[in-house]
Amino acid sequence: MFSAYRNGHFFCELTNAGAPLDPRIDLLRQRLNALPLDDLRARAAQAEQELYNLGITFTVYSDRDAIDRILPFDLVPRILTQPEWRHVEAGVKQRVKALNMFLWDIYHDQNVLKDGIIPRELVVGNANFCNAMMGLDVPGGTYIHIDGTDLVRDETGRFLVLEDNGRTPSGVSYVIENRHTTLRVMPDIASGIDLMPVDEYGMRLQDALSQVAPEGVDNPQVVLLSPGIYNSAYFEHVFLAREMGVPLVEGRDLVTENDRVYMRTTAGLRPVHSIYRRLNDDFLDPEAFDSSSMLGVPGLVRAYRKGNVTIANAIGTGVADDKAVYAYMPRIIQYYLSEEPILSNVETHICAEPEGLAYTLANLDKLVVKPVGESGGYGLLIGPHATKEELSDFSRKLKDDPANYISQPVVQLSVCPTLCETGLENRHVDLRPFAVTGKDTWVLPGGLSRVALKRGSLVVNSSQGGGSKDTWVLAS
């Protein structure tokens, strides 16, 4: 299996050229190497059929011919050692703590703006800044209860933060289901390799949401608020509600009375204290935001401001994962924590600033350029892979609306062995660890490893044809 595999000049955890391998990594390689290719293909087909039978799908709105898809799953696991994981875990916790302090500040005294750490207009002029949150004291100072931090590894193996996801990060269901699928179809490969578990996520999340419920409630009622079956991540909403053991509701299932939130049940109205919402701010409350929204709950923001219900993640958190604000995260961490960032940012140029725009335009063919408000890999330009016409068109977009873009150098993303037509080939990967914060922060061991299935591609997003892998964290 590995005889023809080459990681090239990219970093690869399973080969890790030039460094001693953990014996368990070597054991995994030996077991994979002993498998006939046809056997691995048969197991991959079995895994795909199981995922299909379980309904583990996502939606691509732009493809009218195949809207619901199975997320492609590669059977060769990604593996992290305990020291590597401890570094990632510490860095994610530090980042989440700083982000929550930043959000508290901008919705209260705004000292970070007064002290010139970050430009005022970048925050108060941000489309995700919410005036309704000004002065609101959220329980425990926690705005981001569920965080997904996108990480990559460069050619030296160093972890870098690519972006923050503090609104409604998705994908954790695949982390758990990928582990279940791996253990079902490859029990012989995993046998005797002690891994950190991933199954306690639902319990941890439910516990955190109970911790931040309004004070004085002995047995808080937590619900998961979903836009409904047509949402791209509806499978995950069902999955997480089941894992937490809480009701899955839509806006029409909730009602507000006297600035309190209730759930409609067959036995009458039942109080709701914490809402894990999986829809954007604009749709949460037609009285406070988009009046045409049929997905939200009229009066929800009034109940929230009165302290009668907790919303996770808090309204207005989108400011914190804006790609332009991301560029200031090293300064934000130093400002609030007086610490150096454990996880570094990728070098970032802000096109809203004259220097950043000039550099980006002069080096467009060498950079990755991203719109600040988009996600899912939409609207970006990868300069080295772009045609002259694409570069010219994007140059005009930049000049017309520079504030909408940032640029970054092309990081030589690490690779993992991936089952392809000819056998095992290297494919680029990233990592999204998930952090849950109530009174303190817990990070799910591992995270979602997304893999670019096209040879040479750097785009790992599922909406752009990417897949996923099981991420193993070796126990101590």
Image: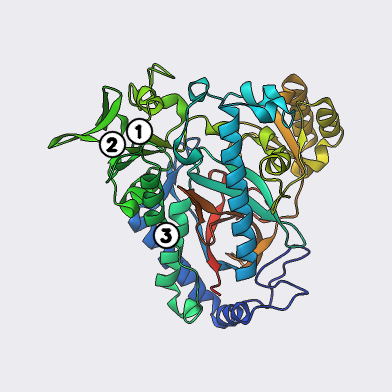
Q: Is residue 172 visible?
A: yes
Other-residue count near label 1 (Cα within 10 Å), few / some / many at <14 / 14–19 / ≥20: many
Q: CA distance from mark 2 to mark 3?
A: 29 Å
Q: Which residue is mark 1?
A: 309
Residue name at image x 65 percent, y 76 percent:
2
- Residue 443, percent from left and from top: 52, 56
Q: Is residue 200 left or right of residue 420?
A: left
Q: CA distance from mark 2 to mark 1?
A: 7 Å
Q: Give the residue type that dot 1 points to.
A: Val
- Residue 334, percent from left and from top: 72, 43
Other-residue count near label 3 (Cα within 10 Å), few / some / many at <14 / 14–19 / ≥20: some
Residues tagged 3 and 1 counted as in contact (Cβ below 8 A)? no
Q: CA distance from mark 3 to mark 1?
A: 31 Å
Other-residue count near label 2 (Cα within 10 Å), few / some / many at <14 / 14–19 / ≥20: many
The answer to whether residue 387 is above or below residue 159 is above
Label total for image: 3
Q: Give the residue type that dot 3 points to.
A: Glu
Residues tagged 2 and 3 counted as in contact (Cβ below 8 A)? no
Q: Give the residue type that dot 2 points to.
A: Val
- Disc 2 element: loop
Closer to us: 69 or 230: 230
Residues tagged 2 and 1 counted as in contact (Cβ below 8 A)? yes
3 or 1: mark nearer the eye: 1
Q: Quadrant of residue 342?
A: bottom right
Tag on residue 272?
Answer: 2
